[in-house]
Amino acid sequence: MLFKFGSTKPKVLIIDDDASLQRQVQYRFDKRDQFAVYQASDGESGLKLINKVHPDLVILDWMLPGIDGPEILRQLKAASKTAGIPVLMLTGRDKIGDIEDAFALGAVDYLTKPFALQALSKKAHKALSLVK
């Protein structure tokens, strides 16, 4: 079943330790894309929020305080309750090996910083279309 826009707002969790980035993405997603936005600034609180709100999409940074992005991705994909949540990596790591690793762990898309909000929005909509 595809996510149905218009029924309820898609829940998007942003896990990133950059407060400025979180504010920009929050504003864009809330005002333009009509997403319900949740935020975490470290890996541990991100994992707790995932289990609490069960988001439709996770936007995940690679380098985080505590638990890093790849470990969060591993844990999400290993648990049956969260394995189907699409994860979009949003990170400054732009090496081919990092990108390949993220996809091997189960990321559905990858966007490097700096980025355009419009590009992130487009990738988020694409990832949400994968929600089962």
Image: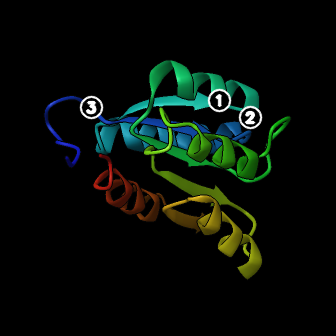
Instruction: Tell me whether the residue at label 2 lies in contact with that at label 1, contact meaning CB atoms closer than 8 angstroms.
Output: yes
Q: For residue 103, which quarter of the picture? A: bottom right
Q: Which mark is residue 9?
A: 3
N-term mark: 1 or 3: 3
Q: Which amino acid lies under the numbered mark 1 shown in the image of this protein?
A: Leu
Residue positioned 76% across, 77% down in the render = 97
Q: Residues within 10 Å of mark 2 (few under 14, many from 20)?
A: many
Task: Find the residue positioned furthest to the right.
Answer: 66
Q: Is residue 107 left or right of residue 11?
A: right
Mark nearer the viewer, 3 or 2: 2
39 and 67: which is toward the camera: 67
Residue 131, image x and y in percent? 32, 47
**Cα gap from disc 1 to disc 3, whole angstroms:** 21 Å
**Cα gap from disc 3 to disc 2, whole angstroms:** 24 Å
Does the rendering let one see residue 43? yes
> Where 52 sits versus 14, above or below?
above
N-term mark: 3 or 2: 3
Residue positioned 70% across, 68% down in the render = 101
- The residue pinned by badge 1 equals 47
- The residue pinned by badge 2 equals 43
Q: Residues within 10 Å of mark 1 (few under 14, many from 20)?
A: some
**Cα gap from disc 2 to disc 1, whole angstroms:** 6 Å
Mark nearer the viewer, 1 or 3: 1
